[in-house]
Amino acid sequence: MADYQQVQSVRRLMGRISFRGDLLNELTELCASEGITLGRVEAIGAVSRAQIGFYNQQTRKYQNLVLEKEMEITSFSGNISLKDGKPFVHAHILLSDDTGATVGGHLMEGTQVFACEFIVEEFSGRTFERGFDEDTGLSLWIK
Ligand code: ZN
């Protein structure tokens, strides 16, 4: 049975990440400075390099993929919850290169923005707190 709750939209913040800024770090800092602990994020734009992860379900470790090239952010969405008492952004990104080929995965630190326009939406409701999940080895929302 799914564990869920109804949430209400409180406010939306719209803006852009700084040139050469780290996509994940800037969004996390924004949530911390605005006190956002429950919400969602979406963005489009371009990166000059990227670091994405693939969670290997057998080894239970993230395999990092470093992409040292210019790419478009064709899709980017994620959620905001709490981990270790601080806002935590969990986002997945789809990137396309100059041939239109796409690659995607779990957004890691080390993704450098060329230009990026985001929308962060804050929700009210019980905050989801992340904790160790035995079934997956991941840090998932605990009850
Ligand atoms: Zn992920």
Image (cartoon, grey):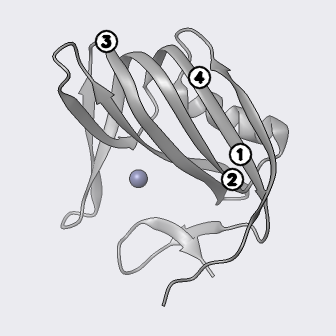
Q: Which residue in the structure is indicated by mark 3?
A: 70
Q: Distance between the residues labelled 4 and 2?
A: 17 Å
* Image coordinates for residue 96, horizontal then vertical, percent: 27, 24
Task: Looking at the picture, tell me which residue is in the foreground, 130 or 17.
Answer: 17
The residue under the point 68% across, 39% down is 120
The residue under the point 16% across, 16% down is 99
Image disc number at residue 117: 4
**Helix, strand or loop at mark 1:** strand
Question: Is the CB atom of the residue marked by disc 4 within 8 angstroms of ligand 1's nearest atom?
Answer: no
* Image coordinates for residue 59, horizontal then vertical, percent: 21, 63
Q: Please say if 43 is above or below 81.
A: above
- Going from N to C along the chain, the mark reached first, 3 or 2, is 2
Task: Looking at the picture, tell me which residue is in the foreground, 127 or 132.
Answer: 127
Give amino acid for label 3.
Glu
The crowd level at tag 2 (other Cα within 10 Å; few <14, some 14-19, many 20+) is many
Q: Which residue in the structure is indicated by mark 1?
A: 121
Q: Please say if 126 is above or below 106.
A: below
Image disc number at residue 2: none
**Helix, strand or loop at mark 2:** strand
